[in-house]
Image (cartoon, grey):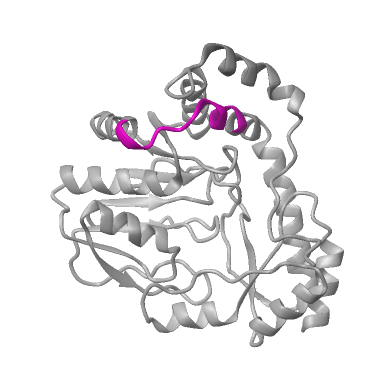
Amino acid sequence: MISIPYFRPPPIDYSAIEPRIADIVESRVYTKGMYRDMLEDELQEYLGVDHVIATSSGTAALWIAMRVMRKNRHADEYIAMPAFNWRSDRIAADSAGYKTVYVDIDPDTWLAVPRRGYVDAHLALDTFGSIDRQDYRGPFIVDATHSLGVKGVGSRGLMECFSLAATKPVSAAGEGGFITTNDRYLAQQCAELRDLCARITEIQCVFALEYLHRLDEMLAEKRRIAEYYRDHLPCKFQELKESTHSKVCFLCKNSEEVITRAAAAGVELRKYYKPLWDMPNSNYVYDKIVCLPAWAGVDVERVMDAVTCAN
């Protein structure tokens, strides 16, 4: 029986959000209301960007951003993205009408190695909250799924896409996402698509606002947890310069055995990302990766015991 799950969102004091939930119930405005506007305004201020478009999910944000880029930047056929990637990025690219070209990753940073040769556009990926600051040639957007909270994000490329899912730094009651851009015309088109098919609910926005107000505190705790693991586990961790420590992962030769034995001790570990294409460094990292529970309040010593026993 799993007693330490891989992830658990921080608790919320219901009394802090109850008046806002009551407002929504009384008004019967469940989407496109004041709390969505409030969330977009606060994210805009926090990130220092001109426009924020809140969406129903991070995948919806990616699809909208890719579709708008493809329509407006003559970047309409091939998009390059890392093979070490969550499959929703490929789904979003396919749905936006792109043909995907995959690139491999650096085996130490786990960030994309830029493609040599021409493609129409790029999707950069911040792997687990570690920031990709490469200057890509041609139009690009950034999958900043795990990166809310790192200074300087939000203005890279044409647009950046963030997730508000349960495992991300800020959660919107389990789902949600948003797009950032400094281009007013692109923002207008993203908002139009969002209103047609990817609206975030007012209740989601209330939860996201509550977590956003505690973001710096939560990131400090995640940093402390990450540093504890790195200090106490004699394993090869991802090389980082800037990170939210959204996921804390290391590499080992017997990763499957580590995960299985930890589960027997009641601790859930995971593997990310199964490569979308056969590439040597992506395969190398996935074959050896183990991702640790790193949520605020996790019993790090018990996790350590389970992982140490498994090694």
Instruction: Locate residue 289, reporting x and y percent.
Output: 60, 76
Q: Nearer the viewer, residue 96 or 127?
A: 96
Magenta stretch, main secondary structure, is helix
Query: Horizontal and vertical percent for residue 160?
Result: 39, 45
Give the residue at x 61% y 32%: 207
Position of 227 relative to 59 (above/below): below
Quarter occupied by the C terminus: bottom right
Number of marks in the rendered image: 0
The residue nearer to you, when weighing 145 against 124, is: 145
Q: In which quadrant of the rendered view does residue 231 lie?
A: bottom right
Furthest toward the left, the residue is 74
Residue 223 magenta-highlighted: no
* Picture quarter with the N terminus: bottom right
> Measuring 76% from the left and 30% from the top, which residue is drawn there?
13
> Magenta residues?
196-207
Q: Residue furthest top?
A: 27
